[in-house]
Image (spheres, rainbow, N blue to C red):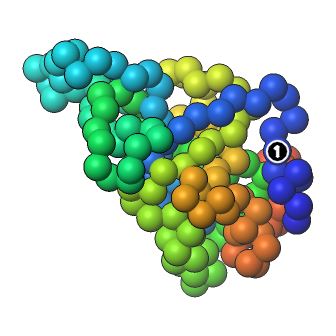
Amino acid sequence: MSSSSTKPKKREYLYDGFVLEEHDGDTIKVCVLLRHLPKSVPLGQWGGDLGFHVFIEDRPALGGPKGTIMARWVTLHCPFRLLGINAPELNTPAGKDSLAYLKTLLKIGDRVVIRSSSPMKVVDPDKYGDRWLGVITNYDTGVEINAEMVRSGHAKVWDGQGTKPV
């Protein structure tokens, strides 16, 4: 599978973020960095939770040495379905293997770049709920996760239409 097969067909939107959780072989939760704020902006009485999965929090500054410089951001915590692929269900041995392999490619806290064909909005769910569809790249390794999951045999190409291939 070439990486061009996982590119969104419409206008591309790029987002920076950090992995919060690996859910299964084709879904991860990401802290998406929406807007940089001055440090003088308070975190608020709820610890920065603004509701609707939106937060004000301190995260590593982009472009700085990894893990050393913190910056204040408006962030969105949301699940992403890896666009163009389908991994086995988590309740199967193949699904557990798929998740284990994904965890070798992405670890909690890893910086990622997300390519999506839809702009980030509070409500823009896929057909299964509140997930966005995207092509995920590990910023530090340059590995496009969607394509690597297929290349390694831990997922199959799927456009979201018809019967799932796995």
Q: Circle 1: is it few (<14), some (14-19), or many (20+) Cα within 10 Å?
A: some
* Residue 81: percent from left, percent from top: 62, 48
Q: Given the current orientation, which residue lies at the most extreme left position?
A: 45
In the picture, the quarter occupied by the N terminus is bottom right
* Residue 64: percent from left, percent from top: 40, 43
Residue at screen point 44% across, 64% down: 107
- Visible residue check, residue 83: yes
- Visible residue check, residue 145: no
* Residue 156: percent from left, percent from top: 79, 67
* Residue 80: percent from left, percent from top: 57, 45
Residue at screen point 54% across, 49% down: 112
Q: Is residue 55 left or right of residue 120?
A: left
Mark 1 element type: loop
The residue lying toward the viewer, choosing from 80 and 69, is: 69
Dot 1 amino acid type: Lys
Residue at screen point 32% across, 52% down: 67
Mark 1 — residue? 7
Q: On the image, which quarter does residue 157 sit in?
A: bottom right
**Looking at the picture, does residue 157 appear above or below residue 99?**
above
**Looking at the picture, does residue 95 appear above or below residue 6?**
below
The residue lying toward the viewer, choosing from 21 and 11, is: 11
Q: Given the current orientation, which residue lies at the most extreme bottom position?
A: 93
**Looking at the picture, does residue 72 appear above or below residue 127?**
above
Q: Is residue 93 left or right of residue 133?
A: left
Q: On the image, which quarter does residue 13 sit in?
A: top right
In the picture, the quarter occupied by the C terminus is bottom right
Image label count: 1
Q: Is residue 111 left or right of residue 120?
A: left
Q: Is residue 47 left or right of residue 97?
A: left
The residue lying toward the viewer, choosing from 154 and 146, is: 146
Residue at screen point 63% across, 81% down: 94
